[in-house]
Amino acid sequence: MLPKLDPLLHAELRLAVMSILAGVEDADFSYLKKQTGATSGNLSVQIEKLSAAGYITVEKGFKGKVPCTTCKITSEGLDAFEKYVNALKEYLI
Amino acid sequence: MENIEQNKEMTALQSLNIISEMMNNSRRTILQNSAKHFILWGSLLILVSLVIYELWHTTGSPIWNVAWFVMPALGFPIVRILDRKDSDVPQNKINMNIGLIWLTYCIFTVCISVIAMLWVPMNVSLVIVVLVGFAECISGFLLKNWAITISGFIIGIGGAVMASMLLGAEQLLIFTVCGIMLVVTGLIIKSQYK
């Protein structure tokens, strides 16, 4: 029987955000927006969902005088991402 | 990539495509951003080495070597300005490690230069050129780029031989070549991750 895919990750934008965050220390909201091509509103909503699940942490702060939101993947998020990728592989075999 | 606006159902293949595309694009952006550091430090190295060479050659005095300290004094503020411009580009393990390698190189170089000037005379050019080659080599390995790794070996080993053979102001020309190699490394990274 094929494993169940994590519904939180099995969504385009959330998966894109997690894929980016899995490869970096942390990333600004503006960087995630640029890389995914998503709108600010939609990206905010999806980031909020990932944060509520404990997959990422969101820190609001300032870079100089400019406000910035920094996202970082948690170890829980990294585990979930790894499990999701492994599950995907089984679908393709 | 097209805008990802909807959380529509995906197939396993689509999901894997999104993952690999996002990871590759992000990696490309981050590493391309690190190319500017190689170009900056390489250009500074060419400029400073040629200026000191000219001054040493004309006046006959090695005292002009003090001008090497202009390099970090000029370079680090420029790096800060450049990094501020691309402040939203994050760091990954590769560019963090490359940054640490070159920072360590800088610390070694400054310490050895000061020790050689004040306490123990030594062939500083030889030591520094080996360190440049070493740092360049490891950068190449991390970037999985053979051209950079090989240029590191050429700088380190060839430079050490030249530093032992050349005397006085002529030794500075080794650093001009090192600077050219660093600029070329930056350009290779830029084109590799275009």
Image (spheres, coloured by chain):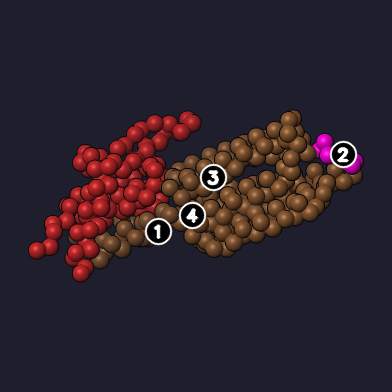
Chain colours: A red, B brown
Using a 10 Å C-alpha cutoff, classify the residue at mark 2 as few (fewer than 14 neighbours), some (14 to 19) or many (20 or more): few
Q: CA distance from mark 2 to mark 1?
A: 52 Å
Residue name at image x 44 percent, y 45 percent: B90
Identify residue for label 3.
Answer: B101
Q: Residue furthest bottom?
A: A93
Q: Chain of mark 2?
A: B
Q: Position of residue A58 (x, y in %)?
A: 31, 37
Give the structural element (helix, strand or loop) at label 1.
helix
Instruction: Kindly report which numbered mark, 1 or 4, lies closer to the viewer in this rendering.
Output: 4
First along the sequence among labels 3 and 2: 2
Three-letter amino acid code at the position of disc 3: Ile
Q: Quadrant of residue A30?
A: top left
Q: CA distance from mark 3 to mark 2?
A: 33 Å
Judged left or right of residue B11, residue B92 is right
Judged left or right of residue A46, residue B186 is right
Stretch of the chain drawn in magenta = B59-64
Whether callout 2 and callout 1 share a subunit is answered yes
Q: CA distance from mark 4 to mark 3?
A: 11 Å
Identify residue for label 4.
Answer: B142
Q: Position of residue B73 (x, y in %)?
A: 67, 35
Image marks 2 and 4: residues in contact by CB distance under 8 Å: no
First along the sequence among labels 2 and 1: 1
The quarter of the image holding the N terminus of chain B is bottom left
Three-letter amino acid code at the position of disc 1: Asn
Q: Chain of mark 1?
A: B
Whether callout 3 and callout 1 share a subunit is answered yes
Identify residue for label 1.
Answer: B24
A23 part of magenta stretch: no
Give the structural element (helix, strand or loop) at label 2.
loop
Judged left or right of residue B94, residue B37 is right
Choose between A90 and B27: the one closer to the eye. Answer: A90
First along the sequence among labels 3 and 1: 1
